[in-house]
Image (cartoon, grey):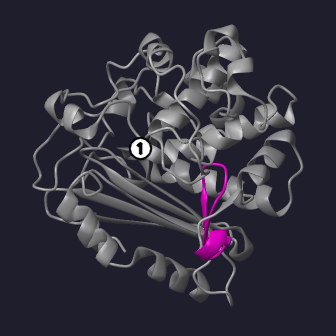
Amino acid sequence: MMRPYESPHHAVVAFQLLNEKVTYLHSGSEVSDAPCEDWFFEIGSITKVFTAILLCLLVEEGRIDPQALVRDMSDTLKDVPEWITPERLISHTSGLPNYFMPLWKALLRQQPDGPYAAFSREDLLAWFRNRRGRPRPSTDRHVYSNLGVGLLGEAMAILEGKPFVELLVEKVTGPMALKDTTDHLDSGQHNRFANPKTTRGKSIPPWTFQALAAAGCLRSTAQDLARFASVVIRAANTPKTALDRAIHRSTLPLYGLGPKGAMAPTAQCSGWLLVTPDNREPGFLFHNGGTAGSSCALYVNPERNAAFAILSNNGVAGNIWGSTKLNWSKPMKHASELFAMG
């Protein structure tokens, strides 16, 4: 499963967690003298899983009704369409597009530090203000939306009166002791950062975020993601604390992506996808992430007490041919086989 990410120019790190024992693997170039499990990578859209847990925790605390209107959370959000709820945003059923401008415009306006770097909260609010009066989509359907999850993050930040990342650290990553899961690296951490690269091995700047941070701002290490997976497994199996219950809530299916809306072989949870490719085996939770210069994937199977992840500074996910080859490698099939072996 590491092979589609590998080359002499890129660093690839993976972990396998089985019954609380963690094994780390590395191939390709070296990032620093630190152990490979301590190297930092952009994790892109895996950030959405953390955003979902934050939402579920605020639900547990009675701060948010997941089925209430986002526009009612604050007068600042009054221009958000009247049918959009937190649950619709985190399940990608809000009807919002993936991006805040047509793709062709985004390609013409490429920025060195990513497509979200200059999009501020005011830009986000103006985007909705300029679309007032547009009709609700005629049918509910699943459309992956970075814009939607970014809006959710800003809505929670506005409600709680603090920046999204600060709120995330206070309520989620801090209590989990994920000291190396963050949006900004200090000097010591930066020395362990795998500089993002294109599939050809050309170094490019990491992405930065403003208003849409909740959709993809985080960087992390294999060791932190292994710790996170361990917490998810424990919480999904035996939730005890409010945070445990929030994690458990995030793993429950909300929208079926199978034939005629069936919950198998794939269902959308809060952030996670629940994948059940074989009815004879327990399903597993999945999310991947990609920027222009980094690609990663995280798989967690609570019933098997197992998880694994792959992190790389290879922009496979942002390259059409690279992502095609990754799909051809059948990662879900291999994931199912690995969990079955465990």
The residue sitting at 35% across, 24% down in the picture is 187
Count the numbered circles shown.
1
What segment carries the magenta color?
Answer: 259-275
Q: Residue at x 68, y 70 (%)?
A: 263
Q: Residue at x 56, y 56 (%)?
A: 226
Residue drawn at (51%, 52%), measured in percent from left and top? 223
Q: Secondary structure at mark 1?
A: helix
Instruction: Say which quarter of the image contains residue 112.
Output: top left
Q: Which residue is mark 1?
A: 44
Q: Is residue 74 left or right of residue 145?
A: right
What amino acid is labelled 1 in the image? Answer: Gly
Vertical position of residue 272 compared to residue 127: above or below = below
**Residue 272 in magenta stretch:** yes
Image coordinates of residue 13 in percent, x first then y, are 36, 60
| Quadrant of image for the C terminus | bottom right
Q: Is residue 101 left or right of residue 173?
A: left
Locate residue 172 relative to residue 49 in the image: left or right: right
| Pick the front one: 243 or 30 | 243
Residue 124, placed above or below residue 149: above
Residue 191 on image: x %, y %: 30, 34
Q: Which residue is nearer to you in this view: 252 or 177?
A: 252
- In the image, is 320 to the left or to the right of 67? left
